[in-house]
Amino acid sequence: MLITIKEKLQKLFLRTKQYIFKINWKFLLQIALVFAAFLKTYFESYWVVLNVLKQFGRREIVKKERMKRIRALGNELYKQREIERREALSLVNYENGLTFFNFKGIRGREDQEGIDLLHWGLIPFWVKDSRAAAEIRFKTFNARAETLLSKPAFRTAARSKRCLVLVRGFYEWQHRGKDKIPYFIYLKDQQPLAMAGIYDDWTDRETGEWLQSCTVITTDANPIMEKIHNSKKRMPAILSRDSENAWIDPDLPAEQAMKCLQPLDESKMNAHTISKLISKRGVEKNVPELVAPYAYDSDRLL
């Protein structure tokens, strides 16, 4: 008997209906919910990442603007410091520091920078009386860079009270047999030089007198100073223009600041022998003749 098209369609419908009822609709619903949750999490994460990138971009812009302002402020500060440096050294004093006992120094402070007159020979804040202060001062004209953070007299000031000691040059003696020949050492460009120093504040408990004192830091001698200071082969730690700011930065850890204490490049320095007027007693020494070149009969090393 021939099956009509209508009957075939009816059979196909019945089979399809049976298959549909056999499908686990609950399982399909769970899959759909999981997929929907995944899409929600994906888009939420996308927006979070997008917002983070936007905020990071804003921070970078703010950071760049801040660095521009800091650089501009630093340039202005450097120009002002150069003006103050020249003004502070406008009154020339030719005397040896051992008789003058005062240095012009730039101190790094949290609120501002300033040029002050500092007494040479560091008196730590913990010294009890004037007698002890006078004794220790003659032992603290210089501080070795290698032991700056370990010596009790220097370690506290080295962490928070670093300064620049400004001079036009300095004196050193060369040993030639039994004779000692004085030298005047300075920069080739005739500019003032900044020696690394530390300072401290001391108050006399008996009189209430307040005193600021400093010491000059020394390091290994460079080749030219090895020839001049041939007994101890040391020299002041003369700072380059690039390291001056770092040395007096109160926020810079002392361990990092110690990297500034390197021998200055000898190509930037010059020196000549001077007369022994500097060692004579009872004569006027604050005269230009003190640093005038003077030739000795013995062979010169420089």
Image (cartoon, grey):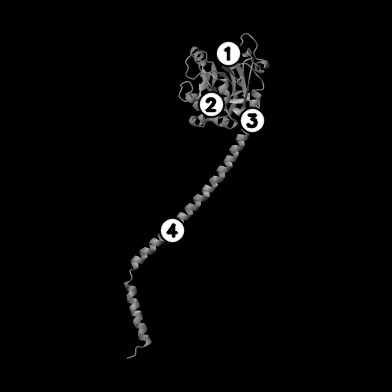
Observer-nearest residue: 100 or 292? Answer: 292
Q: Residues within 10 Å of mark 1 (few under 14, many from 20)?
A: few
Kindly identify which residue carries mark 3.
80
Farthest residue toward the top? 282
What kind of element bears circle 3?
Answer: helix
Observer-nearest residue: 1 or 193? Answer: 193
Q: Amino acid at mark 4?
A: Lys
Q: Amino acid at mark 2?
A: Arg
Mark 4 and 2 residues: CB-CB less than 8 Å, in contact?
A: no
Kindly identify which residue carries mark 2.
162
Q: Residues within 10 Å of mark 3 (few under 14, many from 20)?
A: few
Kindly identify which residue carries mark 1.
179
Of mark 3 and mark 4, the one earlier in the sequence is 4
Distance between the alpha carbons at the discs numbered 3 and 4: 60 Å
Of mark 1 and mark 2, the one earlier in the sequence is 2
> Residue at 51% across / 27% down in the picture?
160
Task: Locate the C terminus and report the quarter of the image it occupies.
Answer: top right
Kindly identify which residue carries mark 4.
40
Q: Residues within 10 Å of mark 4 (few under 14, many from 20)?
A: few
Q: Nearer the viewer, mark 1 or mark 4?
A: 1
Distance between the alpha carbons at the discs numbered 3 and 2: 19 Å
Mark 1 and 4 residues: CB-CB less than 8 Å, in contact?
A: no
Compared with residue 53, is residue 301 higher up or lower down, i.e. above or below?
above
| Image side of residue 241 versus residue 28, left or right | right
